[in-house]
């Protein structure tokens, strides 16, 4: 398991519906953002690479995905500084793999 619900549970203060709501929003938004990020990378659209990585970052952070957050931050920074697109392309598969793995785990763990 590469996610950790400590931050969500702390915010929820025992409200299981809140936890489920946060998980549902993650499952709804992050895969869409990830897909859009992949398209932005393919289109060499630095501005949207930056914006989408920036948007993904707090969502993975909320689930305690430190390594994934670090990868999203790297992609965000590279998008902002218009770094080498091949460097961004090299980092993206790691982000995608982690997010898709967590999506699958969350769906299984929460029967969503």
Image (tube, rainbow, N blue to C red):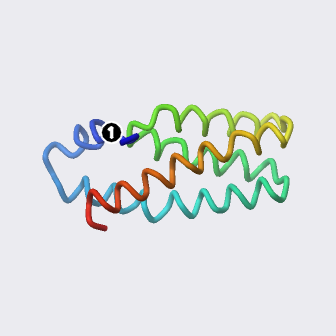
What residue is shown at x 84% (from left), y 35% (from top)? Answer: 83
Residue situated in front as seen by the camera: 22 or 110 = 110
Residue situated in front as seen by the camera: 99 or 50 = 99
Label 1: few (<14), some (14–19) or many (≥20) C-alpha neighbours in 10 Å: some
From the image, which quarter does the C terminus lie in? bottom left
What residue is shown at x 33% (from left), y 55% (from top)? Answer: 22
Count numbered badges in the picture: 1
State left or right for residue 78 relative to residue 27.
right
Q: Picture quarter containing residue 73?
A: top right
State left or right for residue 51 relative to residue 29.
right
From the image, which quarter does the N terminus lie in? top left
Give the image location of residue 7, x and y in percent: 30, 37
Give the image location of residue 28, x and y in percent: 45, 65
Residue placed under numbered mark 1 in the picture: 4
Task: Decide: is 44 above or below 69.
Answer: below
Residue farthest toward the left in the current orientation of the protein: 14
State left or right for residue 4 relative to residue 97.
left
Secondary element at image label 1: loop
What residue is shown at x 64% (from left), y 62% (from top)? Answer: 35
State left or right for residue 77 relative to residue 7.
right
Q: Picture quarter containing residue 90?
A: top right
Residue situated in front as seen by the camera: 90 or 23 = 90
Give the image location of residue 111, x and y in percent: 26, 66
Give the image location of residue 37, x and y in percent: 68, 55
Q: Picture quarter containing residue 2?
A: top left
């Amino acid at each position: 398991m590469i996610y950790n619900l400590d931050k969500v549970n702390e915010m929820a203060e025992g409200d299981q519906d809140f936890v489920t709501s946060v998980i549902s929003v993650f499952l709804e938004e992050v895969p869409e953002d990830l897909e859009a990020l992949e398209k932005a990378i393919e289109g060499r659209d630095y501005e949207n690479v930056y914006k989408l990585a920036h948007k993904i970052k707090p969502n993975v952070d909320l689930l305690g995905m430190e390594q994934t957050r670090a990868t999203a931050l790297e992609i965000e920074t590279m998008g902002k500084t218009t770094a080498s697109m091949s460097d961004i392309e090299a980092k993206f598969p790691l982000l995608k793999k982690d997010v898709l793995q967590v999506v699958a785990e969350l769906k299984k763990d929460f029967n969503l």
